[in-house]
Image (tube, rainbow, N blue to C red):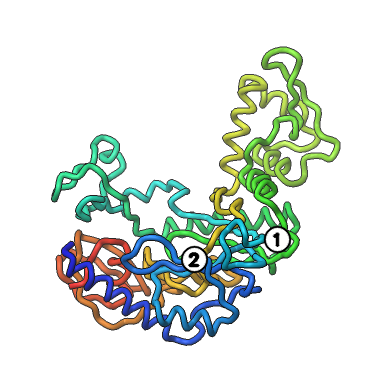
C-alpha cells in the first residue's frame, strides 16, 4: 500500500470511529474509575499511551473526542496512584476476568475462512484448505515473502464454539464456586471471543497464584486419579479402588463419574475400566485427556495478570470495527455480527485485496471485484481485517 493510501485508509477508519464516539453514552463507565489506569492506542502509531487517570466519564469522553483512539482500555486493577509508574501505583486489588478467544479453540472451520496476509507487502490471498496448508510453505505471490499472518473472519460456528465455552465457564462459576449469576457479566470482545467479568468483591484481593490455581481448577489440569477413587499401588502400574468418603456427586468428581457412567456403588465397574485402559498410568493419561475436554478453555495469562488493561465496554475494536458490548442474560440470542456491528450505513469506496465473503447486520456480502462501494460498517470491517483499503 502506498503512503497516500495508508493515510487515506487511516482517515476513513478514524472518521467512522469519530462518528461512533460522537453518539452519547456509547462507552460504559467502569466502577471506581478514579482508581483505574486508562490507556489507548492511536491509529498508525506503535505503542500504547497509558498510565492515565480520569475522575469522570466527562473527562474520558473529552479525551476520546479529541484523540479518536483506535483502541481504548482500562485496568482490571485498582490503584492508589493510577498515574504513577507501575512499581509505585500501590495495587489495591483487581477484578476477576476471563478471556475466551475463538482462535484458541482450534475449530476445524477456521482454515476455510482464514486469509494469509503477507507481513512484508500486505498482499492478501484466498483461504487455503488445511491439508494443502500443511503441505506447502507460504510464498507471497506478489513479493515472494515467506511469512504471512492468518486473518480470520469468524463464522457462525466459531461464535457458537465460544458461546459453548462461556456457558461451560458460567456453570463452573455458579455450580462449583457458588458465585451468583448476577455477579457474572458476559461481554463480546469486539472481535472473536468473549470477556467474562466477575463483580463479586470477594475475588478482588486474589493474587496471581490464587488466580492461577483457579484457572487450573476450571481447565481441569492436574486432577488426581485418587480424587475419583483410583489409588496407586505399591508396584509399577498397580492400583486399587477406594472411593472418597465425600462421594462422587459434586464438582470434578461428578463430571468424571458421569463421563465414566459410574457412581459410589461402582467399584467393580471402575476397576474394570482401569484394567481396560492398561492400569494406573494409562488411566491417569486418559483422565488428563478427559478433563481437558470437559474443562473450560480460557486464556490463563489474562486471568492471572493483575495489572492488565482491558478493552473498555462500548468501545470499538480496531481489529474489526465491532464494539465490545455486554451480551445480556441470554447469550444464545446474542449475534455479534448484528448486535456489535454499530457503525453507520453510509457508503464507502474500498479496494478489496482478495475475494471475500462475510455477513454483517443480517446482510451477506460476496465480493469478487477489486473495487466496491460498501456500507461503512462492512467497509471498515474489511479494512480492519487488512483485507481492503480506502479508495
How far apart are the two marked residues, 1 and 2, measured between alpha carbons?
22 Å
Residue ID at (28%, 61%): 386
Q: Is residue 70 above or below residue 135?
A: below
Q: Nearer the viewer, residue 355 or 99?
A: 99
Residue ID at (64%, 22%): 281
| Picture quadrant of residue 31 | bottom right
Horizontal side of 136 relative to 186 (left or right) equals left
* Label drawn at residue 50: 2
* Front disc: 1 or 2: 2
How crowded is the residue under tag 1: few (<14 C-alpha within 10 Å), some, or many (20+)? some
Horizontal side of 12 relative to 194 (left or right) equals left
Q: Nearer the viewer, residue 153 or 202?
A: 202
Q: Is residue 83 visible?
A: yes
| Picture quadrant of residue 158 | bottom left
Query: Which numbered disc flags the more N-terminal residue, 1 or 2?
Result: 2
**Residue at the spot of label 1:** 204
Q: Nearer the viewer, residue 182 or 213?
A: 213
Q: Is residue 188 visible?
A: no
Q: Is residue 112 above or below residue 1?
A: above
Residue 390 placement (x, y as % from top left) = 21, 71
Residue 113 placement (x, y as % from top left) = 32, 54
Circle 1: element type: loop
Residue 315 placement (x, y as % from top left) = 46, 73
Q: Is residue 236 above or below residue 331?
A: above
Residue 26 placement (x, y as % from top left) = 49, 81
Amino acid at each position: 500500500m502506498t503512503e497516500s493510501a495508508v493515510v487515506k485508509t487511516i482517515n476513513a477508519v478514524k472518521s467512522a470511529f469519530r462518528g461512533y464516539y460522537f453518539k452519547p453514552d456509547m462507552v460504559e463507565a467502569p466502577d471506581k474509575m478514579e482508581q483505574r489506569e486508562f490507556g489507548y492506542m492511536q491509529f498508525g502509531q506503535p505503542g500504547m499511551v497509558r498510565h492515565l487517570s480520569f475522575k469522570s466519564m466527562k473527562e474520558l469522553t473529552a479525551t476520546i473526542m479529541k484523540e479518536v483512539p483506535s483502541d481504548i482500555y482500562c485496568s482490571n486493577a485498582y490503584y492508589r496512584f493510577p498515574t504513577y509508574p507501575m512499581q509505585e501505583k500501590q495495587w489495591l486489588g483487581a477484578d476477576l476476568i476471563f478471556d475466551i478467544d475463538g482462535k484458541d479453540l482450534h475449530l476445524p472451520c477456521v482454515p476455510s475462512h482464514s486469509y494469509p496476509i503477507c507481513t512484508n507487502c500486505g498482499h492478501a490471498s484466498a483461504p487455503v484448505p488445511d491439508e494443502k496448508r500443511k503441505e506447502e510453505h507460504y510464498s507471497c505471490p506478489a513479493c515472494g515473502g515467506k511469512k504471512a499472518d492468518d486473518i480470520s473472519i469468524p463464522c457462525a460456528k466459531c461464535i457458537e464454539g465460544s458461546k459453548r465455552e462461556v456457558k461451560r465457564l458460567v456453570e463452573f462459576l455458579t455450580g462449583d464456586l457458588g458465585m451468583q449469576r448476577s455477579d457474572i457479566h458476559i461481554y463480546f470482545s469486539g472481535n472473536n471471543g468473549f470477556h467474562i467479568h466477575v463483580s463479586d468483591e470477594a475475588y478482588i484481593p486474589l493474587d496471581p497464584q490464587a488466580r492461577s490455581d483457579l484457572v487450573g481448577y476450571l481447565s481441569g489440569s492436574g486432577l488426581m486419579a485418587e480424587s475419583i477413587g483410583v489409588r496407586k499401588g505399591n508396584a509399577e502400574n498397580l492400583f486399587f479402588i477406594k472411593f472418597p468418603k465425600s462421594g462422587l456427586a459434586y464438582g470434578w468428581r461428578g463430571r468424571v463419574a458421569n463421563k465414566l457412567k459410574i457412581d459410589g456403588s461402582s467399584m467393580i465397574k471402575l476397576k474394570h475400566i482401569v484394567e481396560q485402559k492398561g492400569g494406573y498410568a494409562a488411566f491417569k493419561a486418559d483422565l488428563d485427556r478427559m478433563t481437558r475436554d470437559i474443562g473450560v478453555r480460557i486464556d490463563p495469562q489474562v486471568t492471572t495478570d493483575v495489572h492488565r488493561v482491558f478493552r473498555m465496554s462500548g468501545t470499538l475494536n480496531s481489529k474489526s470495527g465491532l464494539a465490545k458490548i455486554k451480551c445480556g442474560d441470554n447469550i444464545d440470542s446474542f449475534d455479534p455480527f448484528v448486535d456489535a456491528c454499530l457503525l453507520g450505513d453510509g457508503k464507502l469506496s474500498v479496494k478489496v485485496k482478495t475475494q471475500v465473503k462475510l455477513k454483517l447486520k443480517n446482510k451477506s456480502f460476496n465480493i469478487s471485484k477489486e473495487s466496491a462501494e460498501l456500507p461503512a460498517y462492512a467497509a471498515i470491517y474489511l479494512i480492519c481485517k487488512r483485507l481492503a483499503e480506502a479508495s
